[in-house]
Structures are given as C-alpha cells and as structure tokens.
Image (cartoon, rainbow, N blue to C red):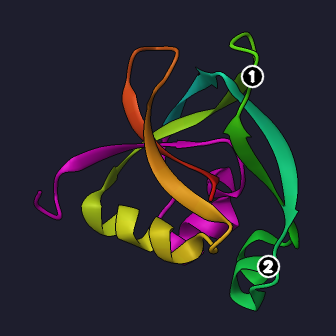
Amino acid sequence: MSEDAIINLFSYGTLQLESVQLSSFGRLLTGTKDSISGFRSAMVEITDPEVIQASGSNFHPIVGPSDNPADELEGTVFQITERELAAADDYEVSDYKRIEVRLKSGIQAWVYVKA
C-alpha cells in the first residue's frame, strides 16, 4: 500500500480531539459520524506523558467486544493516509491494539480496541 492510499480510521475517543490530530498528523481531520455494534466502552489510565500532553487527560476511553450485539459505540470515521495511520499507531499506548471492523454504515475501518 502506498503512503498516499486512503485508509478509514474509526475513532470513539481522543483521536477526535483537535489537539491530538495536530500533534499526531500535523493537520485537522474531517470525518463522518458512524458507529460500531457489539462493543462496549470503559476507561483506561494513561501514563505516557506525551499522550497526556496531547490529549489533556490521563484517562482515555477504551473499547472491547461486548456480549450484547445491541451495544453500539458512536464515533467518527476519518479518511487518512498510511503515513497518518502509522502516526496513530505511534500515538496509541500498549493498552490498545488496532483491528479492522465493519461500521454501521458498511464501511470497513481500523479501530483501536483493548489489547
């Protein structure tokens, strides 16, 4: 995949923040509201000082699979480049892993979930 390829990234948390987008991607992203089914949200304490500085918080949302398929998590799907996806990987701490999911809209997107 080339660095210019368009990739869908779904965010339910801090990647939606302007401060995180500017520090991670050097630009503001535009996105569309969407959601994923079968996931539930919790909070995780972040200890990485750079991530805390970018987000302004040491507690971030984190999601994992739910036993209830009716559970739905709202967020935003962004179109980014492969280089920006690598920057998002660098931003996320080891509590998260990236998986591919189908959003409610039918779009395939990457999302960070509990590792």
- Indicate the quadrant where residue 66 lies: top right
In this picture, which residue range is highlighted in magenta? 1-30
The circle on residue 52 is: 2
Which quarter of the rendered picture does the N terminus lie within?
Answer: bottom left
Please, what is the three-letter code of the amino acid marked with disc 2?
Ile
> Which class describes the residues within 10 Å of circle 1: few (<14), some (14-19), or many (20+)?
few
Mark 2 element type: helix
Query: Which sits earlier in the primary sequence, circle 1 or circle 2?
Result: 2
The circle on residue 67 is: 1
Mark 1 element type: loop
Percent across and percent down for residue 71 are 76, 18
Q: CA distance from mark 1 to mark 2?
A: 31 Å
In the image, what residue occupies the spot 77% across and 89% down?
49
Which quarter of the rendered picture does the C terminus lie within?
Answer: bottom right
In the image, what residue occupies the spot 88% across and 73% down?
58
Disc number lying in front (1 or 2): 1
